[in-house]
Amino acid sequence: MFAPSAAGALQGFEDVLAAPTREAWVQAAALQWRELLVDHANCEKKAASSALALIFAYPEDDALTGALSRLAREELRHFEQVQAAMSGLGVAFIRQKPGRYAAGLRRVLHTSEPGRKLDLLLSGALIEARSCERFQLLAQHLPEPLASFYARLAQSEARHFELYVGLARERHPLQWQPRLAELAQVEADLATAADCELRFHSGPPG
């Protein structure tokens, strides 16, 4: 984990995540892809909302606001694409209770400066990296057209987690890497421990 190249570029989600997704989650997700698609739609909205929240929190940071404005628009396009996929596959939208993943990650983030901005950027990187990993995994187990759709989304999520890490690295060149290691362990525990219900970022049902 955390093995940037000499130029500082990340090689893949393995450089960010502290543990891989368990096979039991992949198998459950492949069987319950309809439920997962509903949660996926919610995740795209949350991703856009998180980017916008950072824009509102740090409006003086021109590079950050410009980059995350573009990211938010892309996340909303993904939400529209998920909606279209649900419609085409006959999957109805249902309200879901929030899963424990995001709440568990938020509990360990700093809520004041210094530290809050770095933690928000790094948590965004971790969520996007986990999404990238799981899109790649699901693309190998789902039927078309979802397989191709998720393969394309994996490429987008790779750009997104690299963007968040890059923003964190530029603003906190000394602190970003050790703090990412701390947060990545929390994220890994949340994403791999048995969960009571299947979510896109949950652990396997158990």
Image: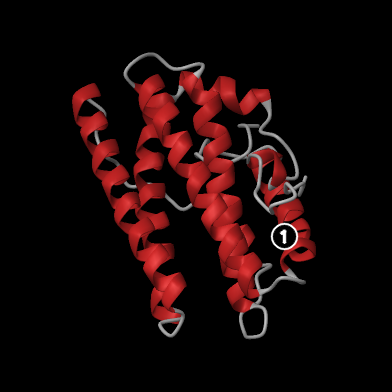
Q: Residue at x 34, y 15 (%)?
A: 144
Residue 21, position as x, y percentages in the image: 66, 33
Q: What residue type is labelled 1?
A: Leu
Q: In the rendered image, is residue 116 in sight?
A: yes
Q: Which residue is drawn at 42% across and 77% down?
A: 62
Q: Which residue is drawn at 77% across and 57% down?
A: 181
| Residue situated in front as seen by the camera: 93 or 171 | 171
Quadrant showing the N terminus: top right
Residue 10, position as x, y percentages in the image: 66, 47
Above or below, 182 against 20 in this view is: below
| Residue situated in front as seen by the camera: 155 or 206 | 155
Q: Is mark 1 on a helix, strand or loop?
A: helix
Residue 191, position as x, y percentages in the image: 65, 43
| Residue situated in front as seen by the camera: 47 or 35 | 47
- Residue position marked by numbered label 1 in the rendering: 180
| Residue situated in front as seen by the camera: 78 or 21 | 78
Residue 117, position as x, y percentages in the image: 58, 76
